[in-house]
Image: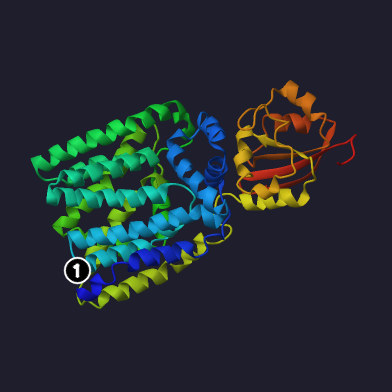
């Protein structure tokens, strides 16, 4: 056991190494592009954008704004906070497993967690899901300590960490009912109730700010069998051996009472609540919103693996598990692994545009598709064809008047088809389409005014 105590940092190191491996391979995709493009704005402009969208992400954008001021906006820099958060998550899960079961169970839980493809995937994502995961594991650890030691300071720390979770992502608060189900005494429930009330009160302002923007998640589908398949692919890389190995080990680990009390509610309650609300009220569930639940699965699997005999079987299974998930890890780091290729779009625009060319975003909010890569925009006119810098489309009549003064216009739009002022431009006989490029979900086109020479 003494040797195992010296290895408690290994899962954190492994998670960091895997997170840094190929971190700048894939391009930013739409969600990351939004993170970077919004966070890099000066505070007044950032607040103006938040008035239109993403108030629920305001704290994360603020944190990313500070990071940008120090290290810039490259893929490596913007994804590094998530790498560090996932590394902390693996370390905290190791500590939780040690506290609940044994050093061996903690070590194996942390290793299994670090090896899961979903952990690397979101360690390389410029969004807040990795931060929420680390804090959720930390809050669960603090809850276990608070119940054991019965000191007010531990309950205060627990409430403080969960409040931060809520402000980073409201869906993190679905962990609260899971924590309630972990408790076994009236005293613990009472103290948890006070802490939960503090968390809810502290998070209420964000809820009030977010409700008017709830239409932004109207795209979410109802959970279905496809959702289950997506979860299997997301968490395990879709490999059946990995899926069944971890699930069987988790089932074995749940025989341990301390693990069952913590892991089962943690894994089941947030998912069940999100899915129930999705069917009863409106769809709110998407797999990445419940990323913090994956740690519960790894916790149970680590305990199950630690219980296997003979003991040399545990490292053999860990190595085997790592081997079968190698293809999934390679796929995550491939340039084509993200839904969008914003880097390719930006590089093409930079290579083919001329100084003073106008840019038309369709819709106007599509500016986030290009601006994560600022080098493509320095010499272009991005304001003339929009009502404001962020979300304002010009009325069709006004657009036709204004565009008459442009020699070349670049259009950035979704690849699903033209609408809005892109349609007006295509109908305008003064302009001809010169060339188009498609970058997965985005299309880049250049139009040239027939009667005007190139700038």
Q: Name the residue under label 1.
A: 307
Residue under the image location 65 percent in, 47 percent down: 374
Q: Which residue is drawn at 43% across and 36% down?
A: 56
Q: Where is residue 158 in the image (x, y as percent from the top left)?
A: 24, 45
Q: In this view, does 145 lie above or below 421?
A: below
Q: How many numbered badges does the structure rendering display?
A: 1
Q: Where is residue 412 in the image (x, y as percent from the top left)?
A: 68, 40
Q: Is residue 401 left or right of residue 161?
A: right
Residue depicted at x 20% and y 51%: 262
Specify the quadrant that holds the C terminus.
Answer: top right
Q: What element carries label 1?
A: helix
Looking at this rendering, what residue extends furthest in the left direction?
186
At x 33%, y 53%, the residue is 294
Along the viewing direction, whichever of 69 and 404 lies nearer the viewer:
69
Q: Is residue 420 visible?
A: yes
Quarter-of-image position of residue 224:
top left
């Amino acid at each position: 056991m003494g040797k195992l105590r010296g290895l408690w940092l290994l899962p954190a190191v492994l998670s960091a190494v895997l997170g840094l491996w190929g971190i700048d391979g894939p391009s930013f995709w739409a969600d990351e592009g939004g993170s970077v493009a919004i966070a890099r704005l000066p505070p007044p402009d950032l607040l103006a954008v938040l008035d239109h969208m993403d108030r629920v992400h305001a704290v994360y954008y603020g944190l990313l704004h500070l990071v940008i001021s120090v290290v810039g906006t490259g893929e490596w820099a913007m994804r590094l906070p998530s790498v560090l958060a996932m590394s902390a998550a693996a370390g905290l899960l190791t500590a939780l497993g040690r506290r609940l079961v044994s050093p061996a169970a903690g070590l194996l839980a942390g290793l299994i967690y670090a090896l899961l493809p979903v952990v690397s995937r979101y360690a390389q994502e410029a969004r807040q899901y990795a931060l929420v995961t680390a804090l959720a594991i930390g809050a669960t650890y603090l809850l276990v300590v608070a119940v054991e030691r019965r000191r007010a300071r531990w309950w205060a720390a627990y409430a403080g960490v969960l409040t931060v979770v809520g402000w980073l992502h409201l869906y993190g608060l679905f962990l609260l009912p899971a924590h309630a189900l972990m408790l076994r005494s009236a005293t613990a429930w009472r103290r948890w109730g006070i802490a939960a009330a503090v968390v809810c009160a502290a998070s209420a302002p964000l809820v009030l700010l977010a409700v008017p923007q709830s239409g932004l998640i109207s795209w979410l589908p109802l959970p279905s069998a496809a959702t289950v398949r997506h979860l299997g692919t997301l968490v395990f890389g879709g490999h059946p051996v990995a899926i069944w190995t971890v699930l069987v080990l988790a089932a074995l680990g749940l025989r341990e009472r301390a693990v069952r009390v913590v892991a089962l509610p943690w894994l089941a309650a947030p998912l069940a609540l999100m899915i129930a609300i999705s069917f009863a009220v409106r769809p709110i569930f998407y797999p990445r919103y419940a990323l913090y639940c994956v740690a519960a699965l790894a916790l149970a699997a680590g305990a199950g693996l630690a219980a296997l005999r003979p003991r040399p079987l545990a490292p053999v299974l860990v190595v085997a598990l790592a081997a079968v998930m190698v293809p999934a890890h390679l796929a995550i780091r491939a340039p084509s692994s993200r839904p969008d290729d914003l880097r390719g779009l930006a590089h093409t625009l930079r290579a083919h545009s001329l100084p003073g060319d106008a840019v038309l975003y369709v819709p106007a909010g599509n500016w986030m598709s290009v601006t994560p890569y600022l080098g493509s925009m320095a010499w272009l006119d991005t304001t003339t064809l929009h009502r404001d810098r962020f979300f304002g489309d010009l009325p069709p009549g006004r657009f036709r008047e204004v565009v008459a003064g442009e020699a070349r216009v670049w259009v950035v739009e979704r690849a699903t088809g033209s609408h809005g002022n892109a349609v007006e431009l295509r109908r305008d006989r003064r302009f001809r389409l010169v060339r188009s490029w498609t970058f997965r979900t985005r299309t880049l086109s250049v139009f040239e005014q027939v009667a005007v020479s190139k700038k």
